[in-house]
């Protein structure tokens, strides 16, 4: 089984779902985007910021472990992830280019991974100070599961607003499956 192909597929899924849900969120008013929803994170925008936090901190960890080759100039364009409650953007217009950049980096990165790379070790310390060692494959599963988990919370909020967010099924969103190039 080619694990790297599966991660490319998940990177595409995340990109396409992020685009789909950002487009759906454009139906919300500024007030709705920032309204306290009494959910895991207080608002729609807080959820988007947390998803970004997860992607940014994971990317930082991959770069520090020399498992992701990202142009240093491009890295300087990205905000530093420090805390789970970091706020990077306050509007969808600010979110769209940053989200697109991060998603494209994950797609490029996963295209470069081989099955052998997926067995390499990622070492990092969590924001709570816990030392962790995982294979790159396990680490990638966490990256993509983290986004999916919090987008699930976001779709619940959108449902409560009466907004149809569309299909979220992997085979529909990435019909080309793991053969995606």
Image (tube, helix red, strand yellow):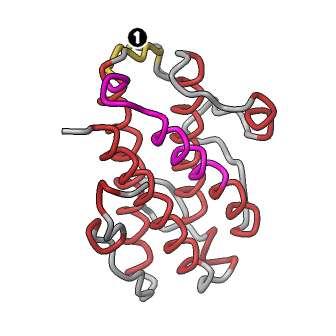
In the image, residue 129 above or below residue 55: above
Of 58 and 45, the residue lying toward us: 58
- x then y, percent, for residue 43: 55, 63
Q: Report the span colored magenta.
A: 101-118
Name the residue at 63% across, 68% down. Answer: 34
In the image, residue 145 above or below residue 140: below
Name the residue at 43% across, 13% down. Answer: 123
Name the residue at 76% across, 38% down. Answer: 74
- x then y, percent, for residue 151: 41, 61
For label 1, the SS is strand
- Disc 1: which residue: 131
Specify the principal SS of the magenta part: helix
In the picture, the quarter occupied by the C terminus is bottom left
Direction left: furthest residue: 1
92 lies left or right of 137: right
Residue 90 located within the stretch drawn in magenta: no
Of 28 and 17, the residue lying toward us: 17
Of 154 and 75, the residue lying toward us: 75
In the picture, the quarter occupied by the N terminus is top left
In the image, residue 84 above or below residue 28: above
Name the residue at 61% across, 72% down. Answer: 33
- Residue 117 placement: quadrant: top left
- x then y, percent, for residue 171: 26, 69
82 lies left or right of 79: left
């Amino acid at each position: 089984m080619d694990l790297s192909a599966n991660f490319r597929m998940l990177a595409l899924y995340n990109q396409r779902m992020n685009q789909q849900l950002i487009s759906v969120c454009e139906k919300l008013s500024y007030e709705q985007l920032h309204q306290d929803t009494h959910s895991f994170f207080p608002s729609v925008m807080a959820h988007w910021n947390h998803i970004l936090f997860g992607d940014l901190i994971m990317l930082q960890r991959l770069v520090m472990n020399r498992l992701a080759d990202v142009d240093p100039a491009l890295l300087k364009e990205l905000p530093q992830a420090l805390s789970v409650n970091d706020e990077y953007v306050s509007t969808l217009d600010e979110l769209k280019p940053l989200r697109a950049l991060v998603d494209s980096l994950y797609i490029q990165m996963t295209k470069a991974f081989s099955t052998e790379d997926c067995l390499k070790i990622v070492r990092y310390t969590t924001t709570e100070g816990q030392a962790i060692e995982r294979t790159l494959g396990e680490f990638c599963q966490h990256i993509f599961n983290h986004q999916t988990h919090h987008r699930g919370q976001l779709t619940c909020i959108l449902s409560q607003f009466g907004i149809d967010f569309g299909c979220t099924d992997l085979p529909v969103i990435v019909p080309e499956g793991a053969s995606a190039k």
